[in-house]
Image (tube, helix red, strand yellow):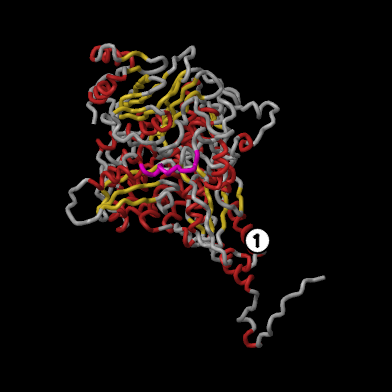
Amino acid sequence: MAEEIQISPPTAELLSILEERFPGAAQPAECEGVVIAPDRLVEIATFLRDEPGYVYLSCVTGVDYPGPTARFPARFEAVHHLFRFQGGSLTLHVHADRDDPVVPSLVSVWPSANVQEREAWDMMGIRFEAHPDLRRILLWEGFAGHPLRKDWQEPYYEADHKPFPSRYPMGRPVPAEERTLLGRNLQYPPDWSPAGWKLQAEVPVYAPMDERAAEGGRPMHTDQVVINVGPQHLSAHSALGIVACLDGETIQRLEPVLGYLHRSHEKIGERNTWLANMPFTDRLDYMCSMSNNFGYAVAVEKLLGVEVPERAEYIRVIMAELTRVMNHLISIGFFTNDIGVYLTAMLYALEERELIIDLFEMASGSRMMCNYFRFGGVARDLPEGFLPLAKELVYERLPRRVDELERFLMDNEVFRARSIGVGVLPADVAVAYGCTGPLLRASGVPYDIRRAEPYSIYDEFDWDVAVRDGGDIYARFAVRFEEIRQSLRILRQALERLPDGPIQAGKKQPIVKVPAGEVYGRVESPKGELGFYLVSDGGPNPYRYHIRTPSFVNLGVIGELCRGHLVADVAPILASIDIAVGEVDR
Amino acid sequence: MPTQKPRLPELPPELQGTVHIMPWDRLYNWSRKRSLWPLFSGLGCCAIETICAAAARFDQARFGMDVVCPAPRQADLMIVSGTVTKKMAPQVVRLYNQMAEPKYVIAMGACAISGGPFKEGYNVVSGVDKLIPVDVYVPGCPPRPEALYNAFLALHARWDRETIRSLRWYQKDEDEGIPVPALGPDLVDWRLTDKIATLGEK
């Protein structure tokens, strides 16, 4: 853990410290944070981690500036967002050449950079030097091009920005299929032909496993086997692949294979208008659409600088906390499925979830994809009859049912045997891997963004951060049960104090004018830290739209968690991390 | 003119009420209507609604669909519940090929029908019917469990019109299956090879 430091140094002060230690290596950035010279990056990052206490690398991504414009020369930028647990954030920018972008890798400083740098390489083509394992992560090896580059066009490309001219105004839309040569969402390099071509995509998936298997030192005469779990598997949580190298039944090395639900979220998001991205955020973590809306709204409102009316803030908190209750219930239910109870125990959790979904449907009109938040407020006011139902649920039914569920599960002999001491995650490893949410708090780190960096009106409520010390599966579910109770506590206060008034700042408008700038807005979604990194060039669309999802980063630690355990423990460990594949792959 | 009913043999009085005589087709369709086993496969958001459809409030077991099996060899019905991405396409086709005849496919939700909100995405297949034949389309994003049930009923109605003689399972010719697409510079559908080869000339 980081040492305590008295004063939180703002960027200007930090710059002077950096100037003293590393003369000439750090400059103030155009928008936010500091620009670091690439050759000093690893040194400076180590210094920042060890001395001012920026122990937590939240987000790594890239931004592409293809042509020299008025604001920017042609270049790539790697952007790192650092946080301190005592409060305070820092953004590091590293510039790279547009034609051959190379940036030093920070995996040696923060292991959490591993998956995120692989993603930036896959999407942007930024090469991270000295990265131990720089392979594509969401797409496959052999895919033509790096899709998030501004000059890369998808097969159905029509225009850089929506609304497309063929649609608006009075346009005559042509089906996308008719605009491509094959009539499909496919395109190939001009000189490529399927004749004589050999499949390569799966080789890099298994190659690291084979290396591992080639290493000697087997204590017993057993064979090492490489197995696949998923993407079609009962506990694959939709479509997640896992490749594991086994010695007998013990896992030696395991890594997730991602991208089976990669829906090109960010590319579509950069074509969309600002508000049109709101329904897309619903589909990130499809179990908690309200929390995703919240994250996006908070990030854009930071750029816009709008003040949200009090009633809207209360409604937002009510929705977000109901979502948290719902997500933890599902997570507990799926876990019982994964330890082999199949559907029976899950029914208890799903029954309560249906009642919460009813409330969402009343308010937003949809069971799952709520699309309820707007910049500066919410889409519509609470309908008549919402409050009595919500109060009945929050005061009477849910506390009783959660107690019951906890008694069934946490005192259960089988559950305890499968979870205590399994998949132990020490606190320092959790922090180094960038884990957030219940996964981190179960390792004894009381870090919750609602408390550490309060957004919306969370500082007005009386509640505690749920934390446990065990770091094993049992502790994670204990944290989830405790969090449900704390959420109910917040809900009781919010429902009691809900004020009257407007639900939207200013007028509702479909096209939002967002001033140029960049922002990293983050909220505590039920699964962990959900961050939106947005760059605006002042136009009607986001210039860069990157989502740092908790599931994706938390999943990076699964290899560490599973090493040395049995195959049968993989499903419970995966369920205890609590992922949504829509959010992992985006 | 009314259609002629098949002549059924006379039942002895002591067996009436315990024995039912019906054509093979009706028996076959009646029994499989009540023992449909869906494949437990989720591809995204809609998978959560399929789970809700199976859970207590909606209770899929009413349709005899109590067994939800994750193994394709035992399944009769594939519910494509979510976005079919290019990376997942080979697996979807392989799963379909592994299912035993007679097999049916429900495309659930906008993504499985056409790509839906993610249609323009570079990694999205514009509808699962580009890969495998689809029997029922269920619109919605995601469709409610009731809409999914409507699709089951639509399947039932279709089976009433089917005869055992036309089912593929009882045919002599061997089912080759659908060629599994591969991941090249983009998704390679082997049925499009000729077209792809002519692309370079244009």
A563 in relation to A510, above or below: below
Question: What residue is shown with label 1?
Answer: B157
Q: Amino acid at mark 1?
A: Ala
Residue A63, percent from left and from top? 43, 24
- Seen from the viewer's position, the closer of residues A407 and A99 is A99
- Residue in the image at 47% along x and 13% along y: A71
> Could you tell whether B72 is left or right of A467 in the image?
right
B111 in relation to A549, above or below: below
Examine the rendering and report whether any part of residue A27 can be seen.
yes
Q: What residue span does the magenta drawing correspond to?
A: A193-203
Crowding near the residue tagged with mark 1, few <14, some 14–19, many ≥20 C-alpha atoms within 10 Å: few
A308 in relation to A235, above or below: above
Badge count: 1
Which chain hosts label 1? B
Residue B77, percent from left and from top? 54, 58
Q: Quadrant of residue A479?
A: top left
